[in-house]
Amino acid sequence: MWPRRSWVQVPSLAPKKHCFRRCFFCLWFIGGPARQRLAWLASIFLPSPVMVRVRFAPSPTGLLHVGGLRSALYNYLFARHHGGQCILRIEDTDQTRYVEGAEQNIIEMFRWAGIEFDEGPHVGGSFGPYRQSERTELYRHHAQVLIERGTAYYAFDTSEEIERMRERQQKAGIAPKYDRTSMRNQFTLGPEETQRLLAEGAEHTIRLFIPLTGETRTTDIVRGESVFANRTIDDQILLKSDGFPTYHLANIVDDHLMGITHVIRAEEWLPSLPKHVMLYDAFGWEKPQFAHLPLLLSRERKKLSKRDGDVSVLDYKDKGYLPEALVNFVALLGWNPTADREIFTMEEMVAMFDLEKVNKAGAIFDVDKLNWMNGMYLRQLPAERLGDELMPLLQQAGFDGVERAYATAVLNLVKERINFVSDLPTFANYMFGPVKNFDQEYAEKHWKPETTGQIAEIANRLEGVSDADWNTTSIEAVIRAYAEELGASAGKLIHPLRYAITGKRVGAGMFETMEVLGKAESLQRLQAQAAAR
RNA sequence: GCUCCCAUCGACUAGUGGUUAGGUCGCCACCCUUUCAAGGUGGUAGCACGGGUUCGAAUCCCGUUGGGAGUACCA
């Protein structure tokens, strides 16, 4: 077995090969003894002729999936790491599965997540159009090319006939596979009949001709080499009877025409890789390098799907996850740059990304860890950034007219106690309006008969603190001094204070809370409770 | 069924022939403390199994078992 490193052609290794393909002088020397040295020279004097180009190619059949986000992210990181380009291509060749608004969702979610494409339907580019439905002529033309080369053929079977063929095969206990010798196609029908059917406009498909013997070898950056016996590979339909291509044709044609150098996609595509390899060979095109990513799994170790609950990026956005956290989390599902850290900015990930360090085994999407990570970002991100998230949430919670500076001060106060920005309106509701619910059990435990007088006295003393001096330090000084006078622990006073001011037993430091709440409101609440109890 | 892929704590992973198998989440305990968190410290827990190769295997090879994906005129 070769070491993995040798299969990968990152740009630094590439000039060797491409120099020979494109450089006139090198061509002359191919096979000669000077080859090695020349390649070495070329790599020094010639700028790298290959630019890394990768693509994320979703089909607009629904909301962007977190697995899709991960695939796109790896493409993005790889492209940026190598100074290459990342392309978004919409694979909408299945008219029956088209979902209105799906493309829009995909684009919006990437914008939210901070993944930018250099080319795509939303930003343009010189390799467009970027929607496959707008490129159908291209596919028809290329299918025709294969027909002429004899690597593809016409078939006239109906869906029902195919269905019956499969049933027969299942009954016979053999693997379902298109049978060229018994079905209705240009081989069984003969050239005249085929021409006649085509001329009269009979519905037909174009299938890839796969030899019955031999084997096809594939190379994958993360998985290494695999061998497939050709007889197990199906004669894939390339052009459907509605004139649209299947994924297999469209993806090869587009990847080639768009100059894609690396195909980075999920493992579910691995079984069709030999077909793709054969297609490249059929066209006589140079193959890109492939990297098949491990699947994202549910708790049941199955491919993460809609049935497993939250699976779309929008779900997580709506639940209040920060894009930075989701992206960071999803990046670490299948790739790990270093053993001693978990939190990485996008820039750091770009700098460290390496396809060779991508794992082979599927990864379970563990929400617990995501939650923790969201909390980490909540605590680390600058208040200014978090304010953008917070303001609309306060609005939604019915707290109108809250000043941004005050809102971020509150967030700063309690951010260590919550995991989501969206927890704040509930967790600290008492900071945006009068206390709605007082925790009676809490009061019973800490509000003693003498407490009423003490709270009133505290209110009196705090009255003496000027507005300018109203801060954690001076509030704390007043209360600790009073506690000392009473010969009691500060806790004896702090719990009733917490009760009077927040109504809850859980919250941020009391003095800090009072500082942010403000003198007037704090005193008012103390006096109200002293009077009420 | 067939084809292909995969296999380190419950989860995410580090590890590329010699390590007391490391880190993170979770869980537990302790510390800090005005509550709850956060933070700190410690703990719990793992190389699926069986054969080889080797002085030596989590690591390389083979097999078994287990899991997954694919098997469409879907992507």
Image (tube, coloured by chain):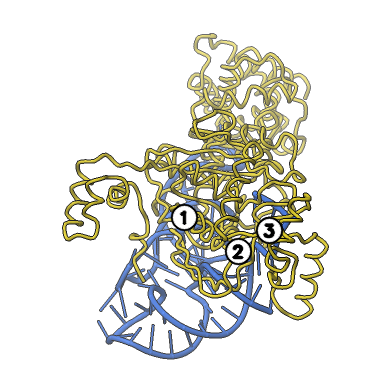
Instruction: Name the amino acid, label 2.
Output: Phe
Q: Earlier in the sequence, mark 2 or mark 3?
A: 3
- A218 horizontally vs A430: left or right: left
Q: Which residue is mark 3?
A: A154
Please identify which colour was used for chain A in the image: yellow
Relative to A463, say whether A68 is above or below: below
Check residue A231 in the rendering and tell me which mark sits there, or answer none: none
Q: Quadrant of the C terminus of chain A?
A: top right
Q: Earlier in the sequence, mark 1 or mark 2?
A: 2
Query: Chain coloured blue: which letter?
Result: B
Work out how far the residue at label 1 is from the one at label 2, CA to CA, in angstroms.
15 Å
Relative to A287, say whether A140 is above or below: above
User: Are marks 3 and 1 in one subunit?
Assistant: yes
Q: Nearer the viewer, residue B62 or A487?
A: B62
> Would residue A239 be seen by someone viewing this image from the given angle?
yes
Q: Which residue is mark 1?
A: A284
Q: Are marks 1 and 2 in contact (CB under 8 Å)?
A: no
Using a 10 Å C-alpha cutoff, classify the residue at mark 1 as few (fewer than 14 neighbours), some (14 to 19) or many (20 or more): few
Q: Nearer the viewer, residue A404 or A328?
A: A328
Q: Earlier in the sequence, mark 3 or mark 1?
A: 3
